Image (cartoon, rainbow, N blue to C red):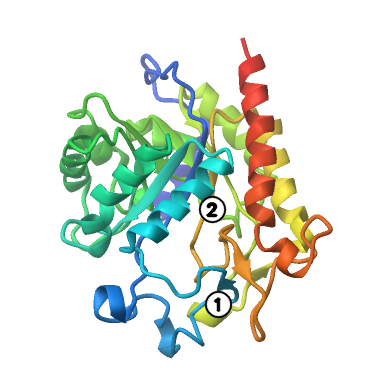
Amino acid sequence: MRRTLIALALLVLLVPAGAPAERSDARAAVSIFYYPWYGTPRRDGAYAHWNQRGHRPPTEIASAFYPARGAYSSSDRRVLAAHMADIRAAGVDQLVSSWWGRGSPEDARLPAIVSAAKAVGLTVAVHVEPYGGRTPETVAADAAAFQRLGVREIYVYGPQDAAPADWAAALRSLSGVRVFAHTSLAGFARAGGFAGLYTYDVLVNDGRSFGRLCAQARRAGLLCSPSVGPGYDARRAVGDPRVKARRGGRTYDAMWAAALAARADGITVTSYNEWHEGTQIEAARVRPGYGDYGPAWGARGVAAERAYLDRTAYWSDRFGARRRLRP
């Protein structure tokens, strides 16, 4: 284990010999992580995820916040259409849909997600989670299947469960698809044959490391898409005592500003609707016993319900303007 950790540390500092990985000229834009795993008895036969850790929806849910749409089903086409409209209006270019392997509810819902996203002008990427039996080889096979749906970008969460050489061998077989690694180790992503990296975790990666991370990525010929988010609170859902306060929107602003200062190629937002971890920017209802978004940018109560969607549009526009100015 000690030798492995030393090797990974060296990978951060040293770019392997030989030509750098090909860096796509097509810059990534603003992407957002999306969770299509919610279920209700009416649509799906039972509640899914809202009832995590023994909670009893719809009055009591596994979240520190309560969605403005209530405890919804991700298989409801009307909800899906409303989500896509929200995301597009927020200036986001790409939806990154959480995916837990073939045959999972997230897999079954993916074609509908692609269709709804396409209807509003969004592209879709897939967030390949650590599903049972996942290997670099299975991810490469998954990527081929995603391409048949028109999905050409993949984000791999927790790729350190396999060696960089194994990732490089598996990803070498792919054509016409970009794969991003969830890591802050540019050397690992470079050695693994990934096109770029992202950080996802907005609790640990608060933006102060973005400048260093993106500089290392550029030296390694990688795209850098650090993740920004409004805060973190998973106490009700999983009992995690750690909290990252939203500070009336200042947490979100600070992370966006750090990503722009780092000259990021793309920005990933954690998240649209990960209600368990309290990272969501989807509209939240004012409800007794739950947090609300006030005083986000001076707005309180009902006026603050959509504050994070509106602020995302502001930052997305600034990021887009900055990208257009680059040579």
Q: Is residue 247 above or below residue 17?
A: below
Q: Is residue 192 above or below residue 1?
A: above
Disc on the earlier residue, 2 or 1: 1
Mark 2: secondary structure: loop
Q: Is residue 262 visible?
A: no
Q: Is residue 315 left or right of residue 184?
A: right
Q: Position of residue 266 (x, y in %)?
A: 53, 32
Give, as a three-letter code, the residue at label 2.
Thr
Q: Residues within 10 Å of mark 2 (few under 14, many from 20)?
A: many
Q: Marks 2 and 1, how far apart in space?
A: 18 Å
Mark 1: secondary structure: loop
> Which residue carries the number 2 mark?
270
Query: Among all residues in the image, which is located at the extreme front?
Result: 78
Residue at 43%, 32% in the rendered image: 196
Q: Looking at this view, is 153 or 215 the one in front? A: 153
Q: Can you say which quadrant of the picture contains the C terminus?
A: top right
Q: Is residue 261 left or right of residue 95?
A: right
Residue at 17%, 47% in the rendered image: 138
Residue at 47%, 25% in the rendered image: 220
> Which residue carries the number 1 mark?
240
Q: Position of residue 262 (x, y in %)?
A: 66, 32
Give, as a three-letter code, the residue at label 1.
Asp
